[in-house]
């Protein structure tokens, strides 16, 4: 009998079940339905199927379900139970809809949770570790950890009662315990986090905040055979310091396949592209709700007399798109703040002349809420200096700084502000790029005080905007930004305003 065990791992599915684009309904090589077909090709009695988190949030279907209070059961729970997962880990976005959704998912998915460092009211939500003896006698010890940086992003009420212990330290303790107590052939870590350093050089690729600790896990934990990672949406497969590792793209575009040979102790890793037909039986489980979602997406909301379509993403950031002016205009009205900030998200489509919910959810893709902070002119300038790090100069041209493209695209960390006027000189050193900052034509002084509306991610310091994290909270708006936009457009069915060109980005 073969002594090979196969692990199949998904990660960062983000609610994508149906195999087409929600922007225009064209087929795409992604989705859990295609992943399901691929899994069936490789699964046998010595296969372990694992999901590594960020499954409950991200698609228009899951947004529709959770914002329209559908009573037909959590959609991702249904399809993952159908696929008979063996183990699931939690990701940071799985907390976006609060604890009730987390536990509805965990109680219904039909398998063990292995999120060892996620604690709820003093008790781990998952098993500390599991030992699986496969049909061929190979013993696999598995544990899961989630990035402990979640409290820096998530709305406090969504994680009330939760504690997130240090992922690296938890992993070290568990591996040590497994090696002392269990006669395991392999020790496998499932980590909803990524790599903080370049895998070849070991040089840091981001601020060392603790959000990602995969490099340290591979280089500091003795006895860890395999680390299945996620969170960064990268396609990775290899070996680091004797530890095999994998990571897959998001939205069900890839499947990680790992083969562990119980005789030779060899580990083979491979990333499979999802280029197969979708699982029709799986799709049927959600078809009724998907049909209702599609109807909702095509609801007309209003018309637009200003060009709010994104024709070129890079140009829309260098020369602020009027779509951002509109988002900020809505934010200012909803919050009553003096200054507002919004980012242009990756692959945002913008709004055509006839605006529908499909346009909204294809443009504003996160379930963010709004927070108003009180900031001084000094903090505002520090915020803008951090913002200005987004750009770099190459061959006399303004480009996106490589650190915002690699290892994970972070275009959501460049905000454009309204309510002030400012200039970014990209050729200046980092920290000295804001060459002018005014409000209504008057220079902003360090001791000036303003109300500043940002999304909840940014308000918590997300994107390393630490200067705003401790600023006093004036107001919180708990309605999602998409709902705020929809209500605004229905209240103002003709969107028309004078373009605002208040940001200059120069060499």
Image: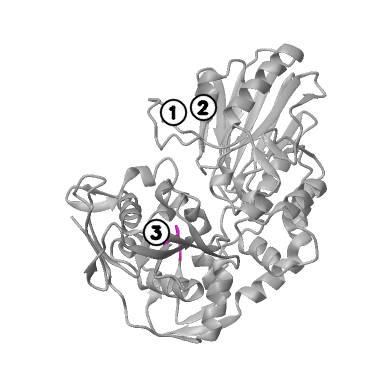
Q: Mark 1 = which residue? A: 199
Question: Alpha carbon of mark 3 to alpha carbon of mark 1: how far?
Answer: 39 Å
Question: Alpha carbon of mark 2 to alpha carbon of mark 3: how far?
Answer: 46 Å
The boundaries of the magenta stretch are 343-348
Quick one: 479 or 130, which is closer to the camera?
479
Q: Quadrant of residue 164?
A: top right
Question: Alpha carbon of mark 1 to alpha carbon of mark 2: how far?
Answer: 9 Å
Residue 72 visible in this rendered orientation of the protein: yes
Please give the name of the residue rendered at 28% of the width and 72% of the height, measured from the top-left corner.
Answer: 501
Mark sitting earlier along the chain (2/3): 2
The answer to whether marks 1 and 2 mark residues whose Cβ atoms lie closer than 8 Å is yes
Q: Which mark is residue 375?
A: 3
Location of residue 319 in the rendering, given as x and y in whole percent from the top left corner? 28, 65
**Residue 127 vertical position relative to residue 309 in the rendered view, above or below:** above
Q: Is 385 inside the magenta-drawn segment?
A: no
Nearer the observer: mark 3 or 1; the answer is: 3
Q: Quadrant of residue 184?
A: top right
Q: Quadrant of the C terminus?
A: bottom left
Nearer the observer: mark 1 or 2; the answer is: 1
Q: Is 346 inside the magenta-drawn segment?
A: yes
Tag 3, which secondary structure? strand
Location of residue 260 in the rendering, given as x and y in whole percent from the top left corner? 66, 22
Location of residue 468 in the rendering, given as x and y in whole percent from the top left corner? 43, 52
Please give the name of the residue rendered at 82% of the width and 24% of the height, measured from the top-left corner.
Answer: 135
Q: Residues within 10 Å of mark 2 (few under 14, many from 20)?
A: some
Mark sitting earlier along the chain (3/1): 1
Nearer the observer: mark 2 or 3; the answer is: 3
* The furthest residue to the front: 447
Magenta highlight: main SS: loop
Q: Mark 2 = which residue? A: 238
Mark sitting earlier along the chain (1/2): 1
Tag 2, which secondary structure? strand
């Amino acid at each position: 009998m073969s002594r090979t065990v196969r692990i199949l791992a998904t990660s960062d599915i983000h609610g994508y079940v149906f195999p087409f684009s929600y922007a225009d309904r064209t087929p795409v090589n992604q989705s859990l339905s295609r992943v399901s077909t691929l899994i069936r090709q490789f699964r046998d009695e010595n296969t372990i199927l694992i999901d590594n988190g960020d499954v409950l949030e991200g698609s228009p279907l899951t947004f529709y379900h959770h914002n329209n209070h559908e009573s037909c059961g959590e959609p991702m729970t249904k399809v993952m139970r159908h696929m008979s997962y063996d183990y699931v880990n939690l990701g940071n976005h799985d907390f976006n809809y609060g604890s009730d959704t987390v536990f509805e998912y965990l109680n219904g998915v039909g398998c063990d949770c292995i999120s060892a460092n996620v604690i709820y009211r003093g008790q781990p939500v998952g098993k500390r570790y599991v030992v699986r003896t496969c049909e061929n006698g190979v013993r696999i010890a598995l544990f899961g950890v989630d990035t402990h940086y979640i409290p820096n992003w998530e709305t406090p009420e969504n994680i009330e009662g939760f504690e997130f212990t240090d992922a690296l330290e938890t992993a070290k303790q568990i591996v040590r315990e497994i090696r002392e107590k269990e006669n395991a052939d392999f020790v496998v870590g499932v980590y909803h986090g990524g790599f903080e350093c370049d895998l070849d050089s070991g040089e840091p690729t981001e601020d060392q905040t603790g959000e990602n600790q995969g490099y340290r896990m591979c280089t500091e934990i003795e006895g860890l055979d395999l680390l299945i990672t996620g969170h960064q949406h990268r396609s990775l497969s290899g070996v680091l310091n004797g530890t095999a590792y994998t990571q897959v793209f998001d939205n069900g575009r890839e499947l990680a396949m790992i083969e562990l040979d119980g005789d030779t102790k060899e580990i083979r890793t491979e990333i499979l592209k999802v280029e197969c037909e979708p699982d029709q039986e799986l799709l049927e489980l959600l078809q009724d709700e998907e049909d209702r979602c599609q109807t909702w997406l095509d609801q007309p909301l209003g018309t637009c007399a200003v060009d709010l379509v994104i024709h070129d993403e890079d140009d829309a950031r260098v020369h602020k798109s009027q779509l951002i002016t509109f988002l900020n205009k809505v934010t200012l009205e909803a919050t009553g703040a003096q200054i507002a900030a919004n980012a242009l998200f990756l692959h945002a489509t913008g709004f055509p002349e006839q605006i529908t919910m499909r346009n909204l959810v294809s443009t504003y893709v996160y379930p963010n809420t709004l927070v108003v902070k009180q900031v001084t002119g000094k903090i505002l300038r520090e915020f803008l200096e951090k913002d200005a790090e987004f750009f770099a100069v190459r061959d006399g041209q303004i480009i996106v700084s490589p650190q915002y493209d690699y290892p994970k695209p972070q275009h959501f960390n460049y905000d454009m502000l309204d309510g002030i006027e400012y200039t970014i000189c990209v050729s200046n050193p980092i920290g000295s790029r804001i060459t002018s900052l005014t409000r209504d034509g008057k220079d902003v002084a360090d001791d000036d005080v303003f109300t500043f509306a940002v999304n909840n991610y940014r308000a918590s310091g997300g994107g390393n905007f630490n200067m705003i994290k401790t600023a006093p909270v004036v107001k919180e708006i708990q309605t999602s930004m998409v709902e705020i936009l929809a209500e605004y457009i229905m209240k103002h069915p003709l969107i028309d305003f004078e373009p605002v060109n208040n940001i200059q980005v120069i060499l």
